[in-house]
Amino acid sequence: MNDYVLVINAGSSSLKYSLIHAESGEAVADGLIERIGESGGHQTHRGPDGETENSDAIASHEDALRAAIDAFETHGPSLDDLELAAVGHRVVHGGSKFAKPVLIDDALVAEVTELVPLAPLHNPANLEGIKVARRLFPDLPQVAVFDTAFHQTLPPHAYTYAVPSEWLEEHGIRRYGFHGTSYSFVAGQAAQRLGRDLAEVNLIVLHLGNGCSAAAVQGGRSVETSMGMTPLEGLVMGTRSGDLDPAVHGHLARELGWSIDEIDKALNSKSGLKGLAGENDFRELSRLRGSGDAKAQLAFEVYCHRIKKYVGAYYAVLGTVDAIVFTAGVGQHSAEVRATSLQGLERLGIHLDPVRNADPADDGLVSTDDADVAVLVIPTNEEWEIARQALDLVRG
């Protein structure tokens, strides 16, 4: 059997795809199709011939996947020649049902459909990608890999909210956590770089992108994470508020007459760094700070302060920590975020090396040699993790 897996991540108006050699992690080709169902669709495909672009209108996800297949045939590599082993699908919310990858069949589609109320913005798009891929690749195994699966090891005291018990029992209101494929990949990489078995190490992992979350990983198992029933809880993010007094919802409804949908939209798409500084791109935020913008400076300080609070809390949860790991766009590229978030934690054995932190080497180590807690910068690779999990499942 070949080791190539086509990884699909379907959004509401976009489709990302990657052709991954699951054993090596090599991305043989990848692409992004945007503005599906809108005027001015756009496709980017990167393969052996380099990067190509297409601006034809794309009416549906089926048209998008057909356009991706055409790009493989035109610009390479040919999917027929490679003989795919499987198609791997990112599915955001698996609820409490799915703790591992699952082969997709009609029953699986029905179960994921039942979970749509927990992720109304994500699961319907993920399902559309699954349905289209099953029609276009009817003879290939299709595998669902869930963002929430890694966190199914959370103990009840970590995932249970202090609300009426029937809310959990009847409506599934509990902490689920997200970014699970990223945590799974990064935790394994961290153990390798420490020269330790994953089962022997305790990690605090900080996934800092436009969406941000933290996780306490004990022996390869998630025991605490910052995102909750939805990705809104926890750290300050690009456009999401993170932790917030729940009474704010009632106050806004009473004072401004806002509906629940209006409040939800404001907290998810108009808050976070964007709400504080008018900008959710961290590079632009840095430029504004450099020009003396007070709102941008406050946004940066709130962002880093929240990270520091979670580092301290998860240190307490784990008892001992072998490494703190920064990953995703901001975590990987912002030396200033790393330094500010960990400043003052020296008594916990956390000591950054400023030279290493400014320009991390290939091993990702940015702490001093004598630090009790290693600090690592590790690029995440969720597509490789999805491909690897999918291949492992179909191989049995």
Image (tube, helix red, strand yellow):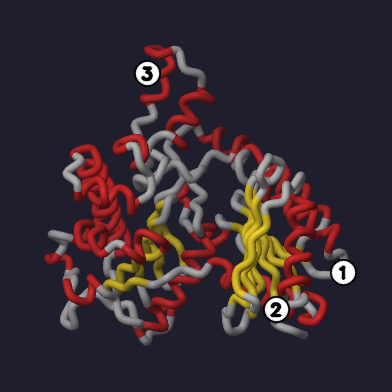
Circle 1 sits on which residue?
Answer: 139
Q: Of the two numbered discs 2 and 3 on the same chain, state the one appearing first in sequence.
A: 2
Residue at disc 3, secondary structure: helix
Residue at disc 1, secondary structure: loop
Mark in front: 2 vs 3: 2
Quick check: marks 2 and 1 in contact, CB under 8 Å? no
Q: Which mark is residue 251?
A: 3
Q: Of the two numbered discs 2 and 1 on the same chain, state the one appearing first in sequence.
A: 2
Q: CA distance from mark 1 to mark 3?
A: 54 Å
Q: Report x, y in % for residue 233.
A: 42, 43
Residue at horizontal 29 percent and vertical 62 percent from the top? 334
Q: Is residue 264 placed above or below 390 in the rendered structure? A: above
Residue at horizontal 58 percent and vertical 68 percent from the top? 383
Q: Is residue 145 visible?
A: no
107 displayed left or right of 57: right
Instruction: Say what amino acid the circle numbered 1 marks.
Output: Asp
Q: Is residue 153 visible?
A: yes
Disc 2: CA contacts within 10 A as few (<14), some (14-19) or many (>=20): many
Q: Quadrant of residue 166?
A: top right
Q: CA distance from mark 2 to mark 1?
A: 15 Å
Q: CA distance from mark 2 to mark 3?
A: 52 Å
Q: Is residue 175 placed above or below 348 in the rendered structure? A: above
Circle 2 sits on which residue?
Answer: 4
Residue at horizontal 71 percent and vertical 49 percent from the top? 112
Instruction: Say what amino acid the circle numbered 3 marks.
Output: His
Q: Report x, y in % for residue 218.
A: 40, 68
Identify the image quadrant of the C terminus. Answer: bottom right
Q: Quadrant of residue 135?
A: bottom right
Q: Of the two numbered discs 1 and 3 on the same chain, state the one appearing first in sequence.
A: 1
